[in-house]
Image (cartoon, rainbow, N blue to C red):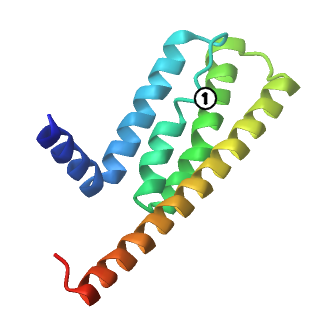
């Protein structure tokens, strides 16, 4: 089981754009199928986290903006077809800001992890450890 998860993580690392976009499209599809009354903005965080953790910063922020806006497109073009209420726009803005903050925090955590790994590696080299 550990080997499978390592292989999967390596694939995600090598093909971050592909996995991020595929998961984003999947969760948009789930959102579309559930209709206008049930929302899954929390699931939008998964493809964003994949991109941000691998330091694909532009992709992370692009998804943070595009996914909630696509939901507005669903509301306008598929469900309401008349007009978009003010509360839909406010909720979209809140979702974009929350996902952008989430992207920022994951990028910071990933950078910190990489710095710590480099420091541990240099300390191991100094001490003659494996």
- Residue at the image point whose x is 80% and y is 20% from the top: 83
Residue at the spot x=87%, y=27% of the render?
86
Image quadrant holding the C terminus, namely bottom left
Residue pointed to by mark 1: 41
Who's the residue at 62% across and 28% down the image? 71
Estimate the x, y position of residue 15 in percent, counting from the top left: 27, 53
Of helix, strand and loop, which one carries label 1?
loop
Residue nearest the viewer, comparing 75 with 2: 2
Residue 27 placement, left or right of 129:
right
Judge whether 60 appears above or below 2 on screen: below
**Looking at the figure, which quarter contains the N terminus?**
top left
Q: Nearer the viewer, residue 93 or 7?
A: 7
Left or right position of 109 against 19: right
Q: Residue furthest bottom?
A: 126
Foreground residue, 55 or 31?
55
- Tell me where residue 20 appears, x and y as whole percent: 39, 44
Q: Is residue 118 above or below residue 128?
A: above
**Image side of residue 130 versus residue 120, left or right:** left
Q: Give the residue displayed 42% in from the left and 47% down from the top.
A: 50
In the picture shown, does residue 52 fall above or below 79? below
Q: Position of residue 45 (x, y in %)?
A: 53, 38
Q: Which residue is situated farthest in the right direction here?
A: 86
């Amino acid at each position: 089981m550990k080997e499978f998860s390592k292989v999967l993580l390596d694939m995600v690392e090598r093909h971050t754009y592909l996995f991020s976009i595929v998961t984003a499209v999947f969760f948009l599809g789930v959102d579309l199928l559930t209709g206008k009354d049930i929302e899954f903005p929390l699931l939008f965080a998964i493809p964003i986290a994949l991109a941000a953790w691998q330091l694909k910063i532009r992709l992370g922020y692009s998804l943070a903006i595009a996914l909630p806006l696509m939901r507005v497109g669903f509301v306008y073009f598929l469900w309401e077809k008349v007009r978009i209420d003010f509360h839909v726009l406010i909720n979209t803005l809140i979702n974009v800001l929350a996902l952008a903050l989430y992207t920022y925090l994951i990028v910071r955590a990933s950078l910190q992890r990489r710095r710590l790994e480099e420091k541990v590696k240099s300390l191991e080299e100094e001490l003659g450890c494996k």
